Image (cartoon, rainbow, N blue to C red):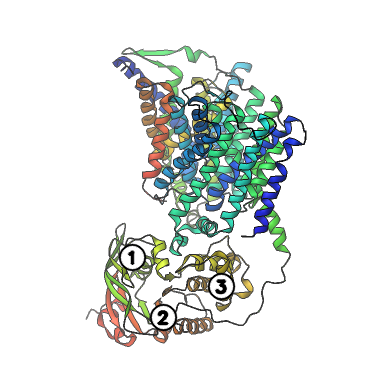
């Protein structure tokens, strides 16, 4: 976080707060209020949907929950207006959190299904409010509600409240963007499963994003209730809010904290030119057209475009040719007999397939354990279960004495387990160094975002990716992506590192290079589980070998020993029929 | 809350079935383009309303029989569907972005309708609306009866096509895995154009029958989105019979909710159903 930016946001807010005393026509206060209103709503949407990729079409519901909380409490229960605003934020946040607590547990409700679900929630809430005393049908009048006198007129007071909300929203958007929470949310956006395995508590982070997003929408609703002074279900839950916020965020740039605000100003300004009756229809058509064009031609929005243009001019600091430094890894003694990981009776099935059947094995501190077996023998499933990517059906996964079986994926990373994916799964929208920093931030003991970025550079250099630190993963070749996987896993400073076929697809020279690197990693004290088909590498590296076949463990021992086992020969070559 | 009489309840169930027929007819094209083309086409609703308004215009202003307007509207909308698919494929629009793009398009269609026909309520006045059949004390208006029949015929016909013709098999193969289907000689591009054209043509058919039974106003476009989506998802994506069957279930449950509680509670049935379905449907695809 840069204090300079936070101070600038506050300064702009303070400057705009003087408007009511400038003697401008009252129209400007209303117009500026609407700008603030849409800025809050668009940012609210973006904190959830832009950051995490969970697109909400239900912001009408969250906005409406806040609006009706204020309308009901101030208009019907005679609460003082200011007291209703926290209630509005709370009502919306509770609605969102209750929804999220259920929805975020269901892995299949992502992307477009989440959007549909939130849309449906809007209609349900609207129907309930319409049919209960909260509204009851005729709408709620707020004419008599006493407003706090913040400015020279009632309009000015509403504008100042809207402005305060907008400043708070922009500040919040920036703080989240710059914090660990933001980094985790963007990782969820790119690949939620990988984020969880790297230590991001995805469920909790999504709930936070949703709750904060809803609270902002609720406050915007509460203030808007007194601005319109007569609220109806039809107006409140119309398609205008979800349409508007999506359009504004996408137009402004949903990956940038300021994007939705820029979009809100652009769209509200545009609408201002089409306010009279006949032109309003044209304005809406234009709205639709802008949305279509923005999605087709401006994938990153206005601010995304700006950043792309800026990145085109090469920065002189990048690609400094540091010598291959040796980054600090987790300190642990060299090979000893003490077990680090004990797996007992591990079972995992997929529909109709037994992938792991009663696997019991142990990994000792400081060793390199080779995990081999024919294709489909359960090696990758083993890594997926022991890294928390999949949940075991039964069995115990004891790591340093603690049982991790059944825990959420991020607990495995926190405990000190890291893995690479056989097919690299980098976070596609993050640069190489951000990818590595994320693993450092959330894996193992974790650290702050600034520290993580500073340390990530070492791991990027160690993996030989120094010149590509600022590149996007899609600019790397397969070899480089595999090393990015490795750098990410190492950056977590794992006690146990699981390598899933890191060598496949590499040339012989690259394999030699990688073998040397893996040896260096072990020499610095990291225990390694090594899945590989390339026997030359297995024999060169491992201390012990475990052989899996059809999900069951069939042999264990030194490389030479297990290759003499008849069961192993049968698994690889088939049995002879004499 | 007073419990309605048996006669009223049976009439409710019947009108629920008719409403369900409409849901199914609208949902048919929507579900096919979602399941087979991977597009969540919100514009489908815009097309239904546009077709309904055009039917209204042709009938009221030029005196064409509403059912004859199908002859003009179906090929015209087919062409629109082909052009739309060409554009979406040209820009490689993802499933999610298709939702956003077609959302924008629908807003444009809504504005266009409002510009031409204004936001006033419009009702198609024809001889069909007067015709009513009555049996066992229950009334069945002709337009609704026609809608249900056409809906069932279209769903059944497409189901047969998909199941027993080479074209249908090719389409299912394309939906499963387009590159592999292409490797086996399926012309995925042409099929997608044909499919998209057919889906929009189905929207045109739905629009004509919509105009026969319902009063038109542009702002209603979005109020149909939720319930038809519920029908499509409940019926299974890409399954031609699903939306109709699910639509009938929803229509009847809504009609009963209206009869037992009050009409303003009706939306809660379909949307709660959609929410439950989203949460508990088996995770495939």
- In terms of secondary structure, where does tag 2 sit? loop
> As drawn, is A356 to the left or to the right of B185?
left
The residue identified by callout 3 is A455
Helix, strand or loop status at disc 1:
loop
**Camera-nearest residue between B24 and A21:** A21
The location of residue A338, given as percent across then percent down, is 31, 81
Q: Which mark is residue A404?
A: 1
Give the mark nearer the N terminus: 3 vs 2.
Answer: 2
Residue at the farthest right position: A23
**Disc assigned to residue B145:** none
As helix, strand or loop, the secondary structure at mark 3 comes to helix
Residue B142 point in image, percent of width and height:
44, 17
Please name the residue shown 65% across and 58% down the image. A3
Residue A121 lies, with reference to residue B115, above or below; the image says below
- Chain of the residue that carries numbered disc 2 in the rendered image: A
Report the residue marked by disc 2: A332
- State the CA–CA distance, disc 1 to disc 3: 28 Å
Q: State whether residue A456 is above or below residue B25.
A: below
> Which quadrant is home to the C terminus of chain A?
bottom left
């Amino acid at each position: 976080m840069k204090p300079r930016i936070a101070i600038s946001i506050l300064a702009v807010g303070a400057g705009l707060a003087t408007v009511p005393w400038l003697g401008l026509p009252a129209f400007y206060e209303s117009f500026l209020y609407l700008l603030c209103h849409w800025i809050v709503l668009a940012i609210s949407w973006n904190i959830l949907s832009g950051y995490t990729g969970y697109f909400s079409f239900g912001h009408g519901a969250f906005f409406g929950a806040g609006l009706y909380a204020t309308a009901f409490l101030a208009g019907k229960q005679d609460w003082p207006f200011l007291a209703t605003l926290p209630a509005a934020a709370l009502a919306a946040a509770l609605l969102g959190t209750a929804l999220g607590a259920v929805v975020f547990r269901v892995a299949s409700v992502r992307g477009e299904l989440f959007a549909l679900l939130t849309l449906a929630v809007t209609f349900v809430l609207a129907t309930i409010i319409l049919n209960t005393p909260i509204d009851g049908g005729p709408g709620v009048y707020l004419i008599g509600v006493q407003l706090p006198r913040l400015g020279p007129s009632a309009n000015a007071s509403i504008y100042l409240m809207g402005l305060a909300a907008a400043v708070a929203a922009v500040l919040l958007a920036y703080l989240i963007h710059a914090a660990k929470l933001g980094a985790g949310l963007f990782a969820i956006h790119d690949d939620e499963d990988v984020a969880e395995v790297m230590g991001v508590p995805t469920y909790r982070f999504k709930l936070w994003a949703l709750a904060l997003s809803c609270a902002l929408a609720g406050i915007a609703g509460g203030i808007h209730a007194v601005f319109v002074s007569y609220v109806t279900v039809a107006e409140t839950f119309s398609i205008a809010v979800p349409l508007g916020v999506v359009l504004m965020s996408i137009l402004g740039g949903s990956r940038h904290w300021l994007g939705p605000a820029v979009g809100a100003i652009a769209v509200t300004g545009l609408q201002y030119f089409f306010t009279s009756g006949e032109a309003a229809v044209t304005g809406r058509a234009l709205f639709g057209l802008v949305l279509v064009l923005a999605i087709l031609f401006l994938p990153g929005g206005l601010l995304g475009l700006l950043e792309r243009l800026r990145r085109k001019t090469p920065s002189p600091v990048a690609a400094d040719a540091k010598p291959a430094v040796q980054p600090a890894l987790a300190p642990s003694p060299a090979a000893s007999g003490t077990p680090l990981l004990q797996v007992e009776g591990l079972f995992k099935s997929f529909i109709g397939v037994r992938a792991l059947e009663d696997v019991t094995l142990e990994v000792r501190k400081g060793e390199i354990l080779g995990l081999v077996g024919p294709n489909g023998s359960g090696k990758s499933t083993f890594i997926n279960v022991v890294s928390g990517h999949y949940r075991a059906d039964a069995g115990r996964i004891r790591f340093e004495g603690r049982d991790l079986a059944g825990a959420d994926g991020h607990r495995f990373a926190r405990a000190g387990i890291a893995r690479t994916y056989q097919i690299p799964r980098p976070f596609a929208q993050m640069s190489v160094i951000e990818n590595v920093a994320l693993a450092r931030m959330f894996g193992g003991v974790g650290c702050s975002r600034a520290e993580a970025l500073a340390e990530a550079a070492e791991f990027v250099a160690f993996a030989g990716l120094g010149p590509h630190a600022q590149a996007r993963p899609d600019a790397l070749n397969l070899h480089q992506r595999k090393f990015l996987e490795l750098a990410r896993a190492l950056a977590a400073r794992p006690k146990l590192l699981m390598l899933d076929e890191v060598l496949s697809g590499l040339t012989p020279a690259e394999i030699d290079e990688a073998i040397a690197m893996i040896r260096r990693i072990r020499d610095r004290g990291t225990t390694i589980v090594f899945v590989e088909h390339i026997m030359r590498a297995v024999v060169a590296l491992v201390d012990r070998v475990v052989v899996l076949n059809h999900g069951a463990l069939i042999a264990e021992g030194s490389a030479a020993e297990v290759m003499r086992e008849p069961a192993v020969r049968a698994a690889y070559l088939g049995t002879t029929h004499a | 809350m007073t419990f309605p009489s048996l006669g009223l309840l049976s009439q409710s169930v019947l009108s629920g079935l008719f409403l369900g027929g409409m849901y199914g007819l609208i949902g048919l094209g929507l579900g096919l383009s979602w399941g087979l083309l991977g597009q969540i086409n919100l514009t489908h609703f815009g097309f239904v309303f546009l077709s309904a308004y055009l039917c209204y215009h042709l009938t009221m202003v030029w005196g064409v029989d509403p059912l004859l307007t199908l002859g003009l509207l179906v090929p015209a909308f087919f062409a629109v569907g082909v052009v739309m698919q060409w554009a979406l494929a040209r820009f490689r629009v993802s499933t999610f972005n298709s939702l956003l793009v077609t959302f924008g398009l629908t807003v444009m269609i809504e504005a266009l309708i409002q510009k031409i026909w204004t936001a006033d309520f419009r009702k198609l006045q024809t001889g069909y609306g007067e015709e009513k059949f009555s049996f066992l004390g229950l009334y069945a208006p002709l337009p609704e009866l026609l809608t249900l029949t056409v809906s069932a015929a279209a769903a059944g016909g497409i189901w047969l096509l998909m199941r027993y013709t080479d074209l249908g098999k090719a389409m299912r193969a394309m939906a499963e895995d387009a590159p592999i289907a292409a490797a086996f000689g399926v012309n995925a591009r042409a099929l997608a154009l044909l499919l998209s054209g057919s889906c929009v043509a189905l929207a045109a058919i739905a629009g004509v029958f919509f105009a026969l039974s319902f009063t038109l106003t542009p702002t209603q476009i979005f109020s149909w989105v939720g319930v038809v989506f519920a029908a499509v998802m409940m019926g299974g994506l890409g399954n031609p019979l699903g939306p109709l069957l699910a639509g009938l279930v929803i229509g009847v449950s809504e009609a009963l909710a209206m009869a037992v509680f009050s009409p303003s509670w009706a939306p809660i049935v379909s949307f709660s159903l959609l929410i439950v379905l989203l949460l508990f449907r088996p995770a495939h695809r």
